[in-house]
Image (cartoon, rainbow, N blue to C red):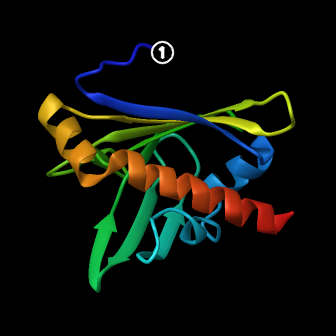
Amino acid sequence: MDLDPNTDLSFTRRLPVPRNLVWECWTTPTHIPNFFIPEPHKVTACEIDLRVGGRFDTTFDVDGNIVENKGVYLDIEPERRLVFTDAYTEGWKPSPDPFMTAMILLDDAADGGTTYTAVARHRSAEAAQTHENMGFFDGWGTVVDQLVKYAQSLR
């Protein structure tokens, strides 16, 4: 995949959790609240229709403020790739103020774990910089740490 250093933010980590379990966590509405936003913030609702064009809607409580994030899946390759965006909502309705497209890429690691890559693609260099300034690397890194801890509790 060609990443644009001006508009794409990404990182790769090896997770000590099998790929199928990482996939299950990312695609099951009851799992999402357990890792998807850095603590102490909370996911208070999640709706998933796991198909291209299907909804991926989450509601967050961030310091007492309710934030609704509506999006759709653009690409799904089971246990390998999940691509979603807030540029559209279900039914391909354009969003008034889209922020990014996210990609979660999974591969087997040699030790039975998962090679996990997260990519956030933005419409402009300014939007990418805003996301980086908001704490993309720390925030998404925390989400991965929470995902690992939660997934390990499911074993």
Q: Nearer the viewer, residue 141 or 53?
A: 141
Q: In this view, does 22 lie to the left or right of 104?
A: right
Q: Can residue 99 be seen in this view?
A: no
Name the spot of residue 138 as percent of width and height, x first: 40, 52
Q: Quadrant of the C terminus?
A: bottom right
Crowd band around label 1 with a 10 angstrom C-alpha radius: few (<14), some (14–19), many (20+): few
Q: Of the residues shown, which amino acid type is indicated by label 1?
A: Met
Q: Height in image: 24 above or below 63?
A: above
Image coordinates for residue 20, horizontal then vertical, percent: 78, 45
In this picture, is 129 found above or below 29?
Answer: above
Q: Nearer the viewer, residue 122 or 75?
A: 122
Q: Which of 50 and 119 is in front in this view?
A: 119
Locate residue 28, reporting x and y percent.
65, 61
Residue at (55% x, 71% y) in the render: 33
Number of residue marks: 1
List the single residue furthest toward the bottom.
64
> Horizontally, is 25 left or right of 61 in the view?
right
Which quadrant would residue 7 be assigned to in this image?
top left
Q: Is mark 1 on a helix, strand or loop?
A: loop
**Picture residue at 69% right of the left edge, 47% below the top:** 23
Residue at 41% across, 13% down:
2
Residue under the image location 48 percent in, 15 percent down: 1
Q: Which residue lies furthest to the front in this view?
A: 138
Residue 144 visible in the snapshot: yes
Label 1, on which residue?
1
Q: Where is residue 85 in the image (x, y as percent from the top left)?
A: 37, 44
The residue nearer to you, when weighing 22 against 51, is 22
